[in-house]
Structures are given as C-alpha cells and as structure tokens.
C-alpha cells in the first residue's frame, strides 16, 4: 500500500501512532493507522440501515403514541403537583424513549421487504434507445 505525499503530510500533522502515541513518523505506523481506520469503517458498513414501508408506518405510529401518552401523563402529573417543569421533563423523557425505539432500524421494522423485479438484461444487438425514440417523429404543420 503506497501513500501519497499528501497522505504522509496529513498523518504527520494530525495523527499519533496507536502503538506508542508518538507523532506518526514511520511508514509502518502510517500504514497501520490507515488500515485500522479502514477496518473500523467496514464494521459500520455491516450495520443494516434500511427500513421497509410498513416498518416506517409502524415506527411513526409508535413515535406518535409514545409522545401522546407522555404528554397526557406529563400534563396530569404537572397539574397534580402544580409544577409545569415536570410536565416538560416527562414529555422530554417520552421523546427520548420514542427516539430510541423508532430511529434505529430494529428488526421489527424490516419484516416486510420489497420484492423487486429482476433486471432485464440488454442484448448487444438492440439499441439502447427507448422504443418511442426509435420511431420517426412526425412534424406538425
């Protein structure tokens, strides 16, 4: 793995070696640092990030339900103890819980994946134009 002059200058300025915490000077430390950062990024690529349409609807319903319930509970609790601040705290806690439950793509939101149609392979003999484009265009007078 060859590093460009720009990469070497960047790592010399901003990084330290992971093994000895000294400023990166050796080529081996630079390669190890690049390799470890690439490995960490590949871990993030394995995390699923999609959610199907029914999962989106379910997440929206759960989000709205938790917010509504926490708002009602917070209002009643704040009314009983006569402290509006506690109403806000309960609603914020409900918001935090709803975010934890609905923002990550949990497996319950990925149960109904879309079935896509298979791609139609183009043959090399056919033109890549659409059928409408191959017809002569009529000129109107």
Image: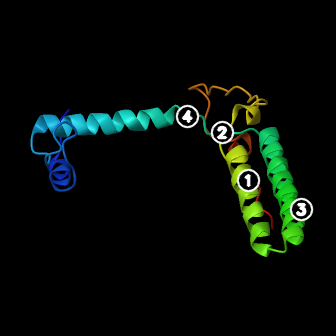
Place residue 47 in its image quadrant: top right
* Label 3 vs label 1, nearer the camera: 3
Label 1 crowd (10 A; few <14 / some 14-19 / many >=20): few
Disc with the residue nearer the chain's start (3 vs 4): 4
Q: Position of residue 3 (x, y in %)?
A: 18, 41
Per the model, the C-alpha gap separating discs 2 and 1 is: 43 Å
Question: In the rendered image, which residue does mark 3 sit on?
Answer: 72
Instruction: Mark 4 and mark 2 in contact? Answer it, CB < 8 Å.
Output: no
Q: Is residue 76 left or right of residue 31?
A: right
Disc with the residue nearer the chain's start (1 vs 4): 4
Q: Position of residue 129 (x, y in %)?
A: 64, 41
Kindly identify which numbered label has been placed on residue 50.
2
Of residues 107 and 127, the one nearer the viewer is: 107
Of residues 120 and 2, the one nearer the viewer is: 2
Disc with the residue nearer the chain's start (2 vs 1): 2
Determine the residue positioned at 17% across, 45% down: 4
Kindly identify which numbered label has been placed on residue 137.
1
Of residues 12 and 130, the one nearer the viewer is: 12
Q: Is residue 40 left or right of residue 13?
A: right
* Label 3 vs label 2, nearer the camera: 3
Q: Is residue 82 above or below residue 42?
A: below
Per the model, the C-alpha gap separating discs 3 and 1 is: 65 Å
Q: Position of residue 95 (x, y in %)?
A: 73, 57
Kindly identify which numbered label has been placed on residue 117.
none
Determine the residue positioned at 76% across, 28% down: 115
Kindly identify which numbered label has been placed on residue 47.
4
Instruction: Mark 1 and mark 4 in contact? Answer it, CB < 8 Å.
Output: no
* Label 1 vs label 4, nearer the camera: 4
């Amino acid at each position: 793995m060859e590093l460009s002059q720009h990469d070497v200058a960047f790592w010399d300025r901003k990084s330290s070696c992971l093994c000895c915490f000294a400023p990166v000077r050796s080529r081996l430390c630079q390669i190890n640092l690049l390799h470890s950062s690439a490995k960490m990024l590949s871990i993030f690529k394995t995390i699923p990030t999609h959610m199907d349409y029914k999962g989106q609807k379910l997440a929206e319903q759960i989000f709205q339900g938790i917010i509504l319930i926490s708002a009602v509970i917070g209002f009643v609790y704040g009314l009983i103890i006569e402290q509006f601040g506690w109403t806000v705290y309960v609603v914020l806690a409900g918001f935090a819980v709803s975010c934890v439950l609905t923002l990550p793509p949990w497996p319950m939101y990925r149960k109904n994946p879309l079935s896509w149609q298979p791609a139609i392979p183009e043959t090399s003999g056919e033109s890549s134009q659409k059928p409408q484009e191959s017809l002569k265009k009529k000129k109107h007078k």
